[in-house]
Image (cartoon, rainbow, N blue to C red):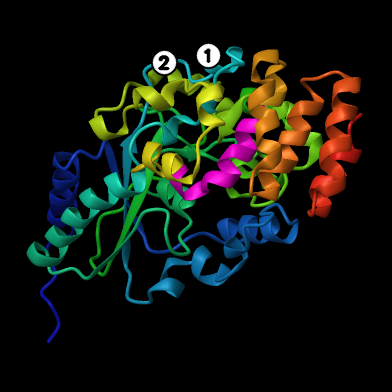
């Protein structure tokens, strides 16, 4: 026996009210379908190899680009947004070479946990009170959340490919609920980028081959978070002191003038993650890393990749007082860390000092890629 379906307008209004009561800043509704243009953009992205090591993006492309291929019973998509607007200018830390720059989204509690907790309550309400079957997602499963958010009226995909909102600028976390309910539809977000190209020109590594196209292989967020191996030499100096992610293209968007500080205490920046000192971070062992970044998305990176990033920042700092800390990492158990210690030292010490260290360490180095780092000093 099928469940009785509530009135479409009443159900939509009640879901919106409940979502806002739960602390979501925005909520929108869209049919469980995406345009052919969205499918073409995804296929173009994959065929050009712009996804880099993120093989999961190339998997289940059909389900990713069409909600009903993921769940045939879905009729509507509820898209919610959590504003995570920062208190300060996120680019200010880039002028402090002794500090590490952590992306705004990762300075507070992991948004997956924060958003999912609220989404589960909303989903339970829809299931129990409105008789709708539901599936919820927070950056999980093959869901094209930004095109869905635009279709649900939350904003539009800017030239940097991220969602832009008239009320939150570039600072929105997204979550979705697929449901069997038929709900009222929103007007799709109108593109308001106009002739502005600040986000494109702000990118330190020229990761945008064209407006609305991102080559992740050149993106600092991808390189410092998703990329598991040695970061290509051509991007290391451009990374500067960015040790987890990059906010440049988001932070320069003019629509941020309408953004405001997050209302969610768990998303506010933790003091120790706002402007952390490189000298403290480089000394972290695995246990200390896990402790400091407990509850943070940074923890998923793992200690070795994180120290890899910190050492790149140390090399770019050109600060002589950090030399002993980089040199100590030549003995680290991780070849990834040892390799970046070599690179950092190549930017911190004289040619004579470098040659002496090389004579001591290179001949006993078991990893070929670390040996290559010793050879690569320019």
Magenta residues: mostly which secondary structure?
helix
Q: Position of residue 327 (x, y in %)?
A: 70, 30
Residue sitting nearer the eye, 123 or 245: 245
The extreme left residue here reads 129
Q: Is 38 on the left-hand or right-hand side of 25?
A: right
Do the CB atoms of the residues marked 1 and 2 lie less than 8 Å apart? yes
Q: CA distance from mark 1 to mark 2?
A: 8 Å
Q: Nearer the viewer, residue 41 or 105?
A: 105
Query: Looking at the picture, how far across and down is residue 220, in whole percent?
Result: 64, 36
Label 1 Cα neighbours within 10 Å, binned few <14 / some 14-19 / many ≥20: few
Residue 88's label in the rendered image is 2
Where does the C terminus fall, quadrant-wise? Answer: top right
Badge 2: residue crowd in 10 Å (few <14, some 14–19, many ≥20): few
The residue beneath circle 1 is: 92
**Magenta residues, as a range?**
298-313
Quarter of the image for residue 351 reads top right
Is 85 on the left-hand or right-hand side of 360? left
């Amino acid at each position: 026996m099928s469940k009785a379906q509530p009135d479409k307008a009443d159900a939509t209004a009640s879901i919106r009210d409940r979502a806002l009561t739960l602390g979501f800043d925005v909520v929108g509704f869209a049919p469980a379908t995406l345009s052919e243009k969205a499918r073409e953009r995804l296929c173009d992205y994959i065929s050009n190899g712009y996804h880099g090591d993120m093989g999961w993006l190339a998997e289940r492309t059909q389900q990713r680009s069409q909600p009903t291929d993921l769940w045939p019973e879905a009729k509507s998509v509820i898209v919610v947004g959590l504003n995570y607007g920062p208190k300060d200018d996120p680019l200010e830390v880039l002028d402090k070479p002794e500090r590490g720059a952590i992306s705004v989204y990762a300075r507070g509690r992991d948004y997956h946990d924060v958003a999912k907790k609220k989404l589960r309550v909303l989903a339970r309400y829809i299931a129990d009170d409105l008789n709708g079957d539901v599936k919820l997602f927070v950056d999980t499963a093959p869901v094209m959340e930004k095109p869905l958010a635009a279709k649900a009226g939350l904003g539009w995909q800017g030239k940097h490919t991220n969602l832009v909102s008239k009320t939150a600028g570039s600072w929105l976390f997204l979550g979705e609920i697929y449901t069997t309910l038929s709900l009222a539809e929103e007007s799709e977000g109108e593109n308001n980028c106009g002739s502005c190209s600040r986000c494109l020109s702000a990118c330190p590594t020229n990761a945008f081959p064209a407006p609305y196209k991102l080559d992740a292989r050149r993106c600092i967020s991808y390189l410092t978070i998703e990329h598991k191996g040695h970061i290509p030499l051509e991007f290391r100096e451009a990374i500067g002191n960015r040790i987890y992610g990059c906010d440049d293209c988001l932070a320069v968007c003019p629509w941020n003038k309408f953004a405001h500080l997050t209302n969610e205490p768990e998303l506010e920046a933790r003091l120790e993650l706002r402007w952390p000192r490189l000298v403290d971070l480089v000394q972290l062992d695995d246990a200390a890393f896990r402790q400091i970044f407990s509850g943070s998305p940074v923890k998923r990176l793992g200690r070795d990749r994180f120290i890899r990033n910190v050492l790149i920042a140390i090399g770019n700092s050109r600060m002589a007082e950090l030399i002993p800390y980089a040199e100590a990492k030549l003995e680290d158990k991780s070849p990834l860390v040892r390799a970046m210690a070599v690179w950092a030292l190549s930017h911190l010490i004289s040619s004579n000092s470098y040659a002496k260290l090389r004579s001591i360490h290179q001949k006993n180095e078991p990893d070929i890629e670390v040996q290559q780092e010793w050879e690569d000093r320019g």
